[in-house]
Image (cartoon, rainbow, N blue to C red):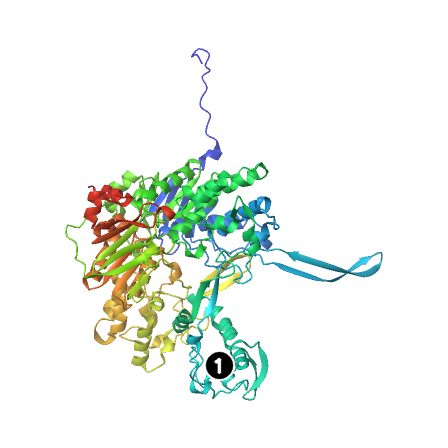
Amino acid sequence: MSSDTRTDTLPAAPHTADSHDLIRVHGARENNLKDVDVEIPKRRLTVFTGVSGSGKSSLVFDTIAAESQRLINETYSAFVQGFMPTLARPEVDVLDGLTTAIIVDQQRMGADPRSTVGTATDANAMLRILFSRLGKPHIGSPKAYSFNVASISGAGAVTVERGGQQMKERRSFSITGGMCPRCEGRGTVTDLDLAQLYDDSLSLNEGALMIPGYKTGGWNYRLYTESGLYDPDKPIRKFTKRELQDFLHKEPTRMKIAGINMTYEGLIPRIQKSMLAKDKEGMQPHIRAFVDRAVTFTVCPDCEGTRLTAAARSSKIDGVSIADACAMQISDLADWVRSLSEPTVAPLQASLRHTLDSFVEIGLGYLSLDRPAGTLSGGEAQRVKMIRHLGSSLTDVTYVFDEPTIGLHPHDIQRMNELLLRLRDKGNTVLVVEHKPEAIAIADHVVDLGPGAGTAGGTVCFEGTVEGLRASGTLTGRHLDDRARVKDTVRKPTGSLEIRGATTHNLKNVDVDIPLGVLCVVTGVAGSGKSSLVHGSMPAGADVVSVDQAPIRGSRRSNPATYTGLLEPIRKAFAKANGVKPALFSANSEGACPNCNGAGVVYTDLAMMAGVATTCEECEGKRFQASVLEYTFGGRDIAEVLAMPVTEAEEFFATGEARVPAAHRILERMADVGLGYLTLGQPLTTLSGGERQRLKLATHMADKGGVYVLDEPTTGLHLADVEQLLALLDRLVDSGKSVVVVEHHQAVMAHADWIIDLGPGAGHDGGRIVFEGTPADLVAARSTLTGEHLAAYVGA
């Protein structure tokens, strides 16, 4: 446009709607936050950093995301809210400019045996429709291909009214499902090893039963000895067929035993109901040990582990059944779906193709749809959840990620960064809690919390750009450009652990010697077979203590003292010093405050509104009866002891009249893993992911074993905490232990004495040893992806 025709107009004033470009948090006090004020720019990528336990998750998840979800839930009717989780309003003065929050956290997927990668992402649902349309022979609706739907049929008379008269008509129905009737869609069947239940050379009166809780003379035992169905003085191996059937499998039957009406039931169904129906994690240790010994899981012989009926497996598209499709590596399955040309299912095919391509794009192309969801690592589970959001048309929403780089090789982190940036570029606000420097580097805005952990944290140390963070002098800023050096000298192995012909999952007949007496790091891209090698192929009887990634469980009644077993020696010491019962010094037992039942707070349920928790007036939050607090040990009562930080308690129980060696040993281990700031009675529900991981490590350090196998111990750890972890690993090795670490963190690789690198790719492109040797050799050779990234990291 020429200048003489241009009309000089003043720029229009910005619209009021465009002025809400910040999420403002004012006075946040959730968990350890100390009146935190921050302003987070919208439609930008903001990374929250700080040491483990500094308050990152409290600010991002427990304040911003929690309030966003609570406000969305309030838009539903009271009836609908009754079915939703009730969320309390976070402790914060002002929260302005919130948008809808989508949370993608590290919570492991449910370990339900029927939950698979395919069912969790809806890929299976689309495959079932595809097969019900195109499968030959046609066997029925999509339900006929589902291992969660059982086939049922029935018939009977129904009464209908016609023209004022009641008439009976015969009706029948049938549902064709795809569930294998033998294993009920689980893919495995359980068998009980009878030799672990009883000694058949003995009679019942001689104590033949070897099951926990079945003591000779106890009621469980008398049920069998006094049933009158067989001779209790006859050795079990001499029972007739009928007697053995009654002893092991008899249906529940009411009968009089020792003059009391009781229900007699065969031993096997009784054990299945009382022990095997329970979650293994919730069992007492001696019962769990029995179940591990007595129960064997074998692949279902009828469906060969596919979970599906023979009919569902017989229906095929181009020679491929739905069981074959689910067993394929997802990258191969995506190519197969792309090769189908059937216009009648084109929209479905496009949607399925997009979901499968998202798996490949996010670096999970090595999985298969039939992989049980409970076997995914924390990082894999988080990325599976991300798949739902990659192709979403939603914009102007807040995506909240909890360490999305967990379980990722440096090679895969680049890909994850691109995905986060793509979500931002669609006009979304992306909030990321992260420790890895490669992920912090892409941030538009950084919020650094600290300066320490627990009570020493909870304040904002820095807010601004990545460059500003580098120059800020905060703990994160100082460590951001840390680069570990490859060790000049490495320890010499004292022996080796031989693994021969390993074929677990994708391993291709791997032979490897794991050196003993040194720090050995097993690495490789995600899905290359590291966990299969270390957890699935260790020789039996190798004296291994395994610390995996499974999160520790615990309610608000659990705390570091109860989880580590520390409370036991403390209770006994209090009881001995005061001449009373140890149970008095447990807030979950006789010593509990009667008003709050030892919880310290009183919960008031307000139906669909968030419940209110108020500090108990009787015990003032101390959780114990007043009479219990009169008993002291070393001048402190039990509530004061539980309020101590680990470092203070370590000194308290070390010497003098309060000396308790058993408690001191546990406290030393907790201080060793960097948890010196935690208070002994802090509820486990308030601990961060990194703190829980280290608490678990502290408990396992007491286990007797020569080889420690650690699965990604740097999960949730700040760059400064990694140094402390490396010092701990060194101390373990120097004390004569062998340490094997599955790890992606370059600082841990550089610190290793020996590296085993798997690859070269993931899934069926991996499963081979691509390098064995010292870190210096790996950097010099640069022959693998790990070698290239490690060389770049150490600046070689």
Please tell me how crowded label 1 is: few (under 14), some (14-19), or many (20+) other residues with Cα within 10 Å: few
Which image quarter is the N terminus in? top left
Residue 281 relative to residue 251: left or right: left
Farthest top residue in view: 4
Query: Residue 493: which quarter of the image?
Result: bottom left
Instruction: Look at 54% across and 85% down and name the residue there.
Output: 227
Residue at x 52% of width, y 60% of height = 302
Report the side of 288 relative to 135 (left or right): left
In front: 510, or 89?
510
Taking the image as drawn, is residue 348 in sight? yes
Percent across and percent down for residue 191 are: 47, 68
Residue pointed to by mark 1: 220
- Left or right: 415 with respect to 670? right
Q: Where residue 778 sits: x, y (%)?
A: 22, 46
| The one of 615 and 164 positioned closer to us in this rendering | 164
**Picture coordinates of residue 248, whole percent (x, y):** 51, 77
Vertical comparison of 196 with 605: above or below: below
